[in-house]
Image: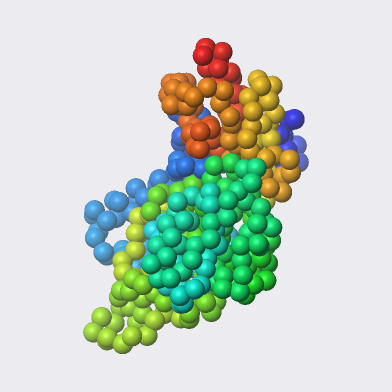
């Protein structure tokens, strides 16, 4: 498999630089680390770092003189996020993180005693605790157990009934990397008259999605994984006009139609998802995230997807040559993702993690396995160094 030349293009007789190498030039982390931990916390691109440093200088030297400029950048972020999703900017709220976005929906939904919400039992805690907290309000939480490493569509459907109000599922499993087709999940929810919530944090940024085509009602994702943004800056999608039924639970001066008319106290909420933002925004985080999204969009999400899948296919191929077992289901690219979970033959994951760091390689340990998650800027030499390091560590044990 030779993927370094795939999708390359030239103009005339002058060879062009493959786009992923240009992408790599924007990632300072490559100067020190071989980074395979984007499913945890991603490093920042240089453009996002520079935007944050620029904000810091402005904040220190000018105070709020340039506040309107910052606010304009946040609106650019809202527009970029909407473009990523195939949504309208009116449907985008800027939130602190995925947990915050899920909680806005969980706490603001018009629940009635006897209603239920359906979630996979192996979801990341962010997509469990906001729903579990509803039990004290008489809402049943149906946690569907996985079979053979992933929750099955038919099992989710069997758990839904006429009292199911929301089905909430992660686009990509955080521990094994199985990638659902969001449209299939939305169809299950809508079949019983429920709404569908997609936790998109492990896919958004490197896999294309259209919330209209997929029938998604709500979506949340923090920016600090595949979107390459800073922590504490994320997005929430609320399909128009669902914000009319979703009660804001944290209101502030910025929730109303006239946020800067401070002497006018009139309770008229913004006719958009921005009503959920409440008060002052995390300016620096959102400014950094905006630059990250613009960088990713410049390469095109289809190319990012193909690059990530090619790299992980190559990674799986190389791991197999050393006899390391991949727990992630890689039988079809339709369900593969940027996450590759590897069974390690000993119980020394902490030691393996430490030894990899000593070799300049960053990975995670999740659910008793090594979790490897490259981004599109990684290259074959990164994969080779990672696998060779694992092989060396295995031989030494």
Q: x%, y% of residue 185? A: 65, 61
Question: Which quadrant does the N terminus fall into?
Answer: top right
- The residue lying toward the viewer, choosing from 244 and 305, is 244
At 40% from the left and 50% from the top, the residue drawn is: 231
Q: x%, y% of residue 251? A: 33, 74
User: Could you tell whether 206 is left or right of 133 in the image?
Assistant: right
At 64% from the left and 46% from the top, the residue drawn is: 147
- The residue lying toward the viewer, choosing from 175 and 59, is 175
Say which quarter of the image contains residue 175. Answer: top right
Say which quarter of the image contains residue 313. Answer: top right
Q: How many marks?
A: 0
User: Could you tell whether 127 is left or right of 18 in the image?
Assistant: left
Q: In the figure, 270 relative to 85: above or below?
A: below
At 64% from the left and 28% from the top, the residue drawn is: 325
Q: x%, y% of residue 303? A: 67, 47
Colouring rule applied to residues: rainbow
The answer, for residue 296, to whether it is visible in the render is no
User: Could you tell whether 17 is left or right of 44 in the image?
Assistant: right
Q: x%, y% of residue 42? A: 47, 42
The answer, for residue 324, to whether it is visible in the render is yes
- The residue lying toward the viewer, choosing from 340 and 309, is 340
At 50% from the left and 37% from the top, the residue drawn is: 367
């Amino acid at each position: 498999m030779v993927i370094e030349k795939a999708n390359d293009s030239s103009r005339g007789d002058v060879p062009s630089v493959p786009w992923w190498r240009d992408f790599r030039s924007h990632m300072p982390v490559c100067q020190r680390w071989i980074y395979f931990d984007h499913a945890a916390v991603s490093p920042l691109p240089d453009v996002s770092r520079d935007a944050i440093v620029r904000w810091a200088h402005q904040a220190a030297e000018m105070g709020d003189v340039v506040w309107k400029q910052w606010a304009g950048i946040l609106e650019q972020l809202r527009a970029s996020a909407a473009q990523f999703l195939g949504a309208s900017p009116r449907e985008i709220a800027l939130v602190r993180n995925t947990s915050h976005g899920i909680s806005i929906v969980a706490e603001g939904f018009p629940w009635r005693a006897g209603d239920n919400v359906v979630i996979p039992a192996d979801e990341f805690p962010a997509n469990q605790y906001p729903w579990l907290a509803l039990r004290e309000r008489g809402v049943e939480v149906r946690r569907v157990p996985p079979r053979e490493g992933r929750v099955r569509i038919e099992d989710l459907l069997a758990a839904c009934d006429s009292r199911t109000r929301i089905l909430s599922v992660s686009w990509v499993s955080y521990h094994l990397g199985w990638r659902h087709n969001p449209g299939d999940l939305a169809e299950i929810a809508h079949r019983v008259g429920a709404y569908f919530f997609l936790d998109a944090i492990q896919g958004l940024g490197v896999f294309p999605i259209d919330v209209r085509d997929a029938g998604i009602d709500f979506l949340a994702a923090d920016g600090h994984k595949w979107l390459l943004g800073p922590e504490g800056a994320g997005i929430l999608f609320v399909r128009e006009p669902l914000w009319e039924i979703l009660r804001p639970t944290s209101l502030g001066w910025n929730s109303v139609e006239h946020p800067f008319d401070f002497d006018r106290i009139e309770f008229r909420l913004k006719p958009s998802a921005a009503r959920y933002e409440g008060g002052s925004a995390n300016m620096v985080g959102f400014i950094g995230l905006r630059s990250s999204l613009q960088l990713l969009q410049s390469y095109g999400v289809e190319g990012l997807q193909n690059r990530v899948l090619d790299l992980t296919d190559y990674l799986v191929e190389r791991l197999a040559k050393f006899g390391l077992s991949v727990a992630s289901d890689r039988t079809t690219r339709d369900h593969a993702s940027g996450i590759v979970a590897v069974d390690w033959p000993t119980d020394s994951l902490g030691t393996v993690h430490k030894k990899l760091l000593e070799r300049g390689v960053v990975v995670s340990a999740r659910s008793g396995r090594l979790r490897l998650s490259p981004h599109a800027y990684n290259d074959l030499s990164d994969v080779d160094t990672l696998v060779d390091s694992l092989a060396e560590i295995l031989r030494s044990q």
